[in-house]
Image (cartoon, rainbow, N blue to C red):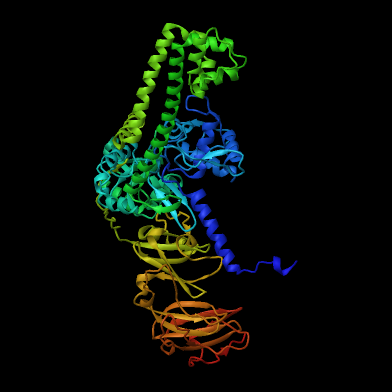
Amino acid sequence: MQDSQIIRTEYSDVMKKSYIDYAMSVIIARALPDVRDGLKPVQRRTLYDMHELGIRYDRPYRKCARIVGDTMGKYHPHGDSSIYEALVVMAQDFKKGMTLVDGHGNFGSIEGDGAAAMRYTEARLEKLTQEVFLSDLDKDIVDFVPNFDETEKEPSVLPVRIPNLLVNGAEGIAVGMATSIPTHNLGEVIDAVKAYMKNDEISTKQLMRYVKGPDFPTGGIVINKDELSDIYESGTGKIKLRGKVEIEEMKGGRKRLVITEIPYTMIGAGIGKFLNDVIGLVESKKTSDITDVSNQSSKEGIRIVIELKKGADVENLTNMLYKKTRLEDTFGVNMLAVANGRPETMGLKQIIEHHVDFQFELATRKYKTLLKKEQDKKEIQEGLIKACDVIDLIIEILRGSQSVKDAKECLTKGVTENIKFKSGISRKMAAMLRFTERQATAILEMRLYRLIGLEIEALVKEHEETLKNIARYEDILNNYDSMAEVIIQDLDKIKEEFGRKRRTVIENGEEAVYEEKKIEEQEVIFLMDRFGYARTIDVSTYERNKEAADSENKIIISCKNTGKICLFTNTGKMHQIKVLDLPFGKFRDKGVPVDNVSNFDSTKEEAVYLCDAEQMRYAKLLFATKQGMVKKVDGAEFQVAKRTIAATKLQEDDQVVSVQVITDNQNVVLQTREGYFLRFMAEEVSEKKKGAIGVRGIRLKKKDELEHVYLFEEGTEAKAKYGEKEVTLNRLKMAKRDGNGTKTRG
């Protein structure tokens, strides 16, 4: 290859340009809606294709697979899943303010169930879509552009006569930006458009007399009314939503909470998550008022039932649900749409402004087309009326003509050379004829029955009607007020036919405040068996079953039910277990694995010591490691809120072998694996912080390691077993810390 054919360029520059091109393609042609019709390209193409296929609201449903296939083949070559997904969403009444597609079959549910495969489902256009989104496409009111392979034409925008961006909202993620527009009430939005048309100086606050706020298809309550004006002014902000909770009386003075409306953000998997959260509140003992929770929702609507104990504090529990679950949630608003070919964040007024400009553009193009048609009709009608007056002459011209061409030339230009006339007067009169080309064609095509008297009268009346229409269309095109009146009348008809009542309540709700019920503090016994299953029982139960409890359980600790259990591991960590998280009940209950109620992982670490956090507060703990390091740590250092902390610092390949409560008047005996014993006073162990390694307790031989630590009071007998031999610890020679120790013979 010649050097002259090689274009040398910086790779980073090429990447930048390519990425910008890609980003703009995603923004404009995929992810963001157009401010004029409120539709993304995939939605626009799907609706237009259904219109082209003739799948009207008053005709039979057609398979979705046919619609998707046709759309993909003609207009949207980006895969069938994106088209079908867009079609499904446009048919789901719980996602859209006004559905645009009438779906037949399984189109998914509010609880997050997906739609059936497109080969099983059918669809057709809604009446609203047909009449408000797709009418007048034949009147040259929008531009048509070539499709991806230039074999078809598609509209660049649909002639939507309502602010669909507000009515149906939008969600989309582009490159570096996202749009999130809530749905609104059709009637309110139309009233706001009318108000703007009457006064384009109107403020956002004044527009909000008509558009009270979002109107979600799931209902619910907006509780930050005062913040809405700022959100609609800037186009960004957060809307606080709550579900609607009703109280139903039951037999025996009991009550139940029934959730009949949910926040819009909860649709889909959020409902299941909410039910799990409610169950979680019961299991974690945050509330004891709930006896049962069930989802009784159906096609008729949402119905989540929470049954309560007798005497339950209903208001407090409702506030708890708002605070601790997604029954109160936030909808992030970012009113981003494509305006004039570029993405723009707009407030309420700007969106309405763009919509009104678009309506005037549509109306102008529509009435120009209609005016042209009426003017053409007028021309032909005037020609036919004139022809009726001289019909005998025209018949004479036709009978005397050799060809249609001769007859037409005579009618349009008065050329009489090739025509035979009965008299010279007729020839003179024929030479004076000056019909237009269109008029001459209409005369030549006229049927004889049009010469009947009544038909001529009808033609004159039709001509008068045409003149009226022309005057009306010219008035609409030349006068702003006349055009505005036509648009407003059209909006009124749409509101009357398709408007509905508001579903979402707008108010200033009070902050949800609830009091956590204080749990009655009591002494309990913590039990953990050798398999790591833990539970708590009351003291009296333990006393009755003491012998069995002691033999069956590895760890037994007396503690408060409101306290915590500290678990020290061989990896130097301390995990905390809330006693309340443990099952409390009968002696023979199995309990739960410690792993489930703490960060402890029994597959990676071993439990070395467990104790009550409160009792440990006033004690000193002795840490000993495999490499013979020892230290004392004040128990107060472990009074932390975190579930897991580093209890000590370890050297490489070292492990904690023992953690025990220690006092200064005790003897310490360190035992190694090879049978070396070292006895010294507890006061010799230095007190350190939990982040320290400690001091050497015993000098280890090569490949030896510390195995056991024994503590006993001075003057008491203490024994330990090493191999087959029993060692009397209090008879061991007293030495100093950091010695070699003595080896037992045996």
Residue 353 falls in image quadrant: top left
Front-most of 12 and 607?
Answer: 12
Is the N terminus in the top left, top right, bottom left or bottom right quadrant? bottom right
Residue in the picture at 44% in, 15% down: 386
Assign the C terminus to one quadrant of the image.
Answer: bottom right
Q: Is residue 601 visible?
A: yes
Residue that extends furthest to the right in the rendered view of this protein: 1
63 is higher (above) or lower (below) than 113: above
Q: Is residue 557 above or below residue 416?
A: below
Residue nearest the observer in this picture, 32 or 722: 32
Which quadrant of the structure image shows residue 674? bottom right
Residue 685 percent coordinates (x, y):
44, 87
- Residue drawn at x 54%, y 35% as measured from the top left: 49
**Residue 611 placed where, x, y %?**
41, 70
Asked if residue 591 is positioned above or below residue 447 in the image, the reply reads below
Q: Is residue 309 left or right of residue 402?
A: left
Q: Position of residue 448 (x, y in %)?
A: 51, 9
Q: Position of residue 56 (x, y in %)?
A: 49, 28
| Picture mark count | 0
The answer to which quarter of the image holds residue 464 is top left
Q: Is residue 490 visible?
A: no
Frontmost residue, 676 versus 101: 101
